[in-house]
């Protein structure tokens, strides 16, 4: 049992905006780092690193609601060394980015239930048969295609689709209001009202919902593989178990073979020279696939083997899509990714989450 857990918690709260070193906290309490870590988990139920990160994120949420400070300044003020690390941690905890959280709270929509019209529309999807769902796979793939283009060329690049004859009137309307910059909750409400006031077949309804939700996810900046996973539930469990989605499947040849770049980043090579597999697993959970793909592009064979052997199978498959979004990477971008990878690892060490 920690001698004075209340004082430890108080110390963490008072120094949230400064680097918190588990070794110094342990020493202050008269324990070794390892023994203190075990005692803290026993007392609080989570690691000290996870506790500090959670408290920082909760504190940031108050600042997002009650101030107009930028996300960058808020992240730095509560102890995150890099804004991308803060955004990832915040999204992991709340499910949305800091900016999106601020917008939803200020418009009273974070905990608000969906409109009655939307509930009724989604409920009707249970009437869709397998043939309907087969046809709606086209809409799913259309959303994935738009998401890829938005990530490669920017959201405004979708404007050219307004003159594409392959899109329906409703889809063009949805793209149009998306490009007008309407806030997410207004965009969603507007598009669902169009559908609620329309005569439709069940298959058309599935298409409408897939496109609306997909557009909202594109606006949020989600990656294609994230969007696909979030749209799958609209097809129902039985259908998902029996259909093989070709999108995102592993290519015959690893794209990395033609993308590798020698960075000669001595710090990167030194930091990860003897990293343990469990530490690598923890590190990779903090990183999005684009960052991992860029790190792989600039890594030596041993590091590549370590990352590949540690990634879950589903993330490996999505990794091919990440390579496609990156396209032709340059050495500066790869080195920046390696340095960010180092920064995340060092922060995890400071938090006591990796050895």
Image: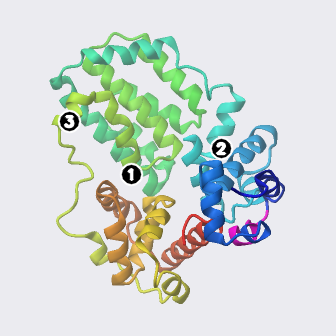
Q: Position of residue 9 (x, y in %)?
A: 77, 53
Which numbered disc, 3 or 2, marks the residue that appears first in the sequence?
A: 2
On the image, numbered disc 2 is attached to which residue?
A: 99
Asked whether residue 75 is drawn in magenta, I would say: no
- Of the pair 259 and 17, the residue shown nearer to us: 17
For the N terminus, which image quadrant? Answer: bottom right
Q: Is residue 229 visible?
A: yes
Q: Is residue 73 left or right of residue 139?
A: right
Q: Position of residue 131 (x, y in %)?
A: 15, 24
The residue drawn where x is 25% and y is 21% is 203
Where 178 falls versus 147 (above or below)? above
Within-10-Å neighbours for mark 3: few <14, some 14–19, many 20+: few
The residue drawn where x is 49% and y is 65% is 283
Which numbered disc, 1 or 2, marks the residue that appears first in the sequence?
A: 2
Within-10-Å neighbours for mark 1: few <14, some 14–19, many 20+: many
Which numbered disc, 1 or 3, marks the residue that appears first in the sequence?
A: 1
- Disc 1 versus disc 3: distance between alpha carbons? 25 Å
On the image, numbered disc 3 is attached to which residue?
A: 241
- Of the pair 63 and 168, the residue shown nearer to us: 63
**From which residue to which does the magenta span run?**
18-25
On the image, numbered disc 1 is attached to which residue?
A: 148
Instruction: Label 3, secondary structure: give it.
Output: helix
Q: Position of residue 211 (x, y in %)?
A: 38, 31
């Amino acid at each position: 049992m920690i001698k004075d857990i209340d004082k430890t918690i108080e110390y963490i709260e008072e120094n949230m905006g400064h680097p918190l070193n588990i070794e110094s906290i342990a020493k202050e309490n008269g324990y070794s780092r390892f023994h203190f870590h075990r005692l803290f988990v026993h007392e609080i139920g989570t690691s000290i690193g996870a506790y500090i990160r959670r408290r920082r994120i909760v504190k940031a949420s108050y600042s997002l609601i009650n101030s107009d400070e930028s996300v960058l300044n808020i992240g730095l003020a509560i102890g995150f060394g890099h804004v991308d690390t803060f955004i990832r941690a915040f999204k992991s905890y709340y499910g949305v980015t800091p900016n999106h959280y601020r917008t939803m709270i200020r418009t009273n929509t974070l905990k608000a239930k969906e409109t009655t019209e939307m509930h009724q529309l989604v409920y009707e999807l249970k009437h869709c048969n397998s043939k309907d769902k087969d046809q709606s796979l086209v809409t799913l793939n259309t959303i994935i295609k738009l998401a890829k283009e938005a990530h490669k060329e920017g959201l405004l690049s979708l404007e050219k689709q307004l003159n594409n004859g392959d899109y329906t009137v409703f889809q063009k309307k949805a793209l149009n209001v998306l490009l007008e910059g309407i806030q997410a909750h207004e965009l969603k409400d507007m598009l669902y009202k169009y559908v609620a006031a329309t005569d439709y077949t069940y298959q058309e309804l599935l298409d409408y919902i897939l496109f609306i939700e997909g557009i909202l996810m594109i606006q949020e900046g989600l990656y294609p593989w994230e969007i696909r996973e979030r749209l799958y539930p609209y097809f129902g469990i039985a259908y998902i178990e029996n259909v093989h989605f070709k999108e995102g499947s592993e290519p015959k040849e690893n794209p990395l073979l033609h993308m590798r770049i020698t960075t000669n980043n001595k710090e990167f090579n030194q930091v990860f020279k003897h990293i343990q597999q469990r530490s690598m697993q923890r590190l990779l959970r903090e990183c999005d696939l684009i960052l991992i793909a860029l790190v792989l592009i600039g890594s030596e064979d041993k590091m590549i083997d370590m990352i590949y052997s540690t990634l879950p199978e589903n993330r490996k498959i999505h990794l091919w899509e990440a390579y496609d979004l990156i396209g032709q990477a340059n050495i500066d971008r790869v080195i920046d990714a390696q340095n960010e990878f180092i920064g995340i690892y060092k922060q995890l060490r400071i938090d006591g989450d990796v050895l």
